[in-house]
Image (cartoon, rainbow, N blue to C red):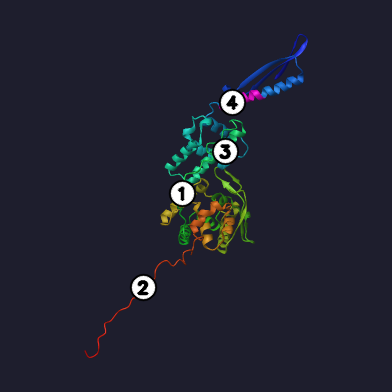
């Protein structure tokens, strides 16, 4: 028992004992105290104070020598294994990225990690040609682990994440390939001619801007032929092997063009019995859709793109066709203008015609032929 009584000299005395167990025997703390003849209320108050002191000692012991490897394992066990169904693909990807990119941190005590440690990780990633977005995700994962550790009282309150406030290095921006209208038509015509299993998938990708998981999760109940609208409200995650909400957790409508309406009615005759709009392609479910599209583009001699680039093509051609920025963002489910900026660069609609009135090139000078005239009769 935590509070024990015994009789001494005819008086009731109290003896208290507290144990705070850690995950390892070395981190377990024990304390006990003989209070003698006091009241039970006083014994209970002392027991409460002793519990707090034992917990403080245990946490202090766990903090001393807690390495990044230990902390990462604890976070993985709590958040990804034993936690609620909150293990999203973001958390899983974050854990895998940390295993890969913070190997040098593993034996280092957590309280020795500094912002310079995060910069060293960025330098290593930069030398391997990795993107700023990849670096940003690693920094976000580091911050998430430290935030969790703070909530779990595994770290001192003053200890901040080494990624907090560390800026990303400025890298050379790489232009992602986007197919022009002629290339898209070549791709789709060739796919139809060869009866490629991804033909209908690519058609919907280019014409709706849906993400891969959103296309996979589309059901015929999401297609409203009467109003000519497609409801995009869910997405399939291959990693979690389940249907979940969209990336932004918001639903949206995409209008059905007359051409797409004809194709969807044709497709319904083939897939209606499955309940899903698009065929269940094994390689697509295995996550190989990007490779299939790249290989097909290479085989027919057009610019090689990956699966997600169809979304870029959709945004670019919407903008070039005169669809405004807010409407294009709404159609594709983009919620941040910052993340939409590179589509504006692809389309170049924000700078189109800006130099037409400069007139800084001189016009060619008028030239004339000079003839020497002689007096008549000479």
Which residue lies under the disc numbered 1?
Answer: 291
* Front one among 102 and 287: 102
Q: Position of residue 19 (x, y in %)?
A: 65, 21
Which of disc 1 and disc 4 is earlier in sequence?
4
Label 1 SS: helix
Q: Is residue 56 magenta?
A: yes
Measure the alpha-carbon separation of dots 4 and 1.
51 Å
Which of disc 2 and disc 1 is earlier in sequence?
1
Which of disc 4 and disc 3 is earlier in sequence?
4
Which residue lies under the disc numbered 2?
Answer: 365
Which of disc 1 and disc 3 is earlier in sequence?
3
Which residue lies under the disc numbered 3?
Answer: 144
Q: Nearer the viewer, mark 4 or mark 1?
A: 4
1 and 2 marks in contact (CB < 8 Å): no
* Magenta-drawn segment: 52-63
Which residue lies under the disc numbered 4?
Answer: 60
């Amino acid at each position: 028992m935590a509070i024990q009584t015994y009789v001494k000299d005819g008086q009731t005395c109290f003896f208290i004992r507290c144990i705070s167990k850690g995950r390892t025997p070395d981190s377990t703390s024990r304390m006990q105290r003989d209070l003698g003849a006091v009241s039970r209320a006083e014994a209970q108050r002392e027991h409460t104070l002793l519990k707090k002191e034992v917990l403080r000692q245990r946490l202090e012991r766990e903090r001393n020598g807690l390495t990044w490897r230990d902390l990462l394992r604890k976070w993985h066990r709590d958040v990804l294994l034993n936690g609620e169904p909150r293990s999203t693909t973001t958390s899983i990807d974050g854990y895998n990225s940390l295993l890969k990119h913070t190997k040098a941190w593993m034996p280092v005590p957590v309280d020795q990690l500094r912002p310079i440690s995060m910069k060293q990780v960025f330098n290593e990633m930069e030398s391997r040609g990795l993107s700023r977005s990849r670096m940003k995700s690693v920094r976000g994962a580091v911050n998430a682990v430290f935030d969790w550790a703070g909530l779990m009282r595994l770290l001192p309150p003053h200890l901040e994440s080494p990624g907090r406030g560390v800026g990303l290095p400025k890298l050379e921006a790489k232009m992602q390939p986007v197919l022009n209208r002629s290339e898209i038509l070549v791709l789709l015509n060739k796919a139809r001619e060869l009866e490629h299993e991804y033909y209908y998938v690519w058609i919907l990708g280019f014409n709706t801007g849906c993400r891969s998981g959103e296309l996979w999760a589309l059901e015929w109940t999401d297609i409203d032929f009467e109003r000519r609208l497609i409801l995009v409200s869910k997405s399939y995650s291959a990693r979690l092997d389940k249907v979940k909400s969209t990336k932004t957790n918001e639903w949206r409508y995409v209008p059905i063009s007359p051409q797409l309406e004809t194709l969807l009615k044709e497709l319904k005759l083939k897939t209606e019995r499955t309940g899903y709009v698009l065929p269940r392609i094994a390689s697509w479910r295995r996550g190989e859709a990007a490779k299939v599209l790249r290989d097909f583009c290479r085989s027919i001699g057009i610019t090689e793109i990956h699966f997600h680039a169809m979304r870029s093509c959709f945004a670019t051609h919407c903008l070039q066709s005169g669809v405004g920025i807010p409407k294009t963002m709404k159609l594709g489910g983009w919620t941040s203008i910052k993340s939409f900026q590179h589509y504006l660069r692809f389309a170049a609609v924000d700078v189109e015609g800006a130099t037409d009135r400069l007139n800084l090139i001189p016009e060619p000078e008028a030239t004339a032929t000079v003839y020497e005239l002689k007096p008549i009769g000479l």
